Image (cartoon, rainbow, N blue to C red):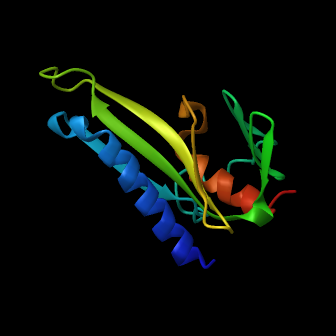
Amino acid sequence: MTEKECLDNIVTFCNSELKKKSWLIFNDHTVTLDKTRLLQDYEKDANFPLPPLLQFEDTHVDHNGVKIENTLYKWSDICSTVVKYDRRATKMGEEGKFITDNYLVFCLQTGKVIEVKLGDIRQYSNLLIHYIEQYKLGIGK
């Protein structure tokens, strides 16, 4: 599959997941997809060193690929990667209070889309998309 086809699959998948949560449209709800990419040198924190491993609950990301529980998806099998930010109001009528769920969404060469919840990503600041792309490209191996 081409990268464009993979990204189209990811967008279609995320849209169908959002439709399953259609009750959220009555709440303040925003979903943002951020394609992984290498940051430019002038971008904030772009020159921070690559950690050997990104660890989130049952998911690990490193130079080998994405490991979810006991299943490893190798980078050679992954066509495209996106970080999804699902931001919604905590309760109806509570202005200014939001919850953000963070997901890694990736498309395999077969066209299958996999989404995994990452949990708290604050420790990686604005570098998550940069780190994932570095692993994917084998930079710093």
Q: Residue at x 53, y 32 (%)?
A: 122
Residue 34: x and y in percent read 47, 56
Q: Nearer the viewer, residue 96 or 48?
A: 96
Left or right: 122 as drawn, with respect to 138: left
**Of all residues shown, which one is farthest toward the right?**
141
The image shows a total of numbered marks equal to: 0
Q: Residue at x 58, y 63 (%)?
A: 37
Left or right: 102 as drawn, with respect to 128: left
Q: Nearer the viewer, residue 19 or 116?
A: 19
Q: Is residue 125 above or below residue 94?
A: below
Q: Quadrant of the C terminus?
A: bottom right
Left or right: 54 as drawn, with respect to 26: right
Kindly indicate the quadrant of the structure image that contains residue 46: bottom right
Residue 11: x and y in percent read 43, 61
Residue 100: x and y in percent read 39, 33
Q: Is residue 122 above or below residue 81?
A: above
Q: Residue at x 49, y 61 (%)?
A: 10
Q: Is residue 9 above or below residue 59?
A: below
Residue 14: x and y in percent read 42, 53
Q: Residue at x 16, y 20 (%)?
A: 94
**Of all residues shown, which one is farthest toward the left?**
93
Q: Nearer the viewer, residue 113 or 33?
A: 113
Q: Quadrant of the N terminus?
A: bottom right
Kindly indicate the quadrant of the structure image that contains residue 97: top left
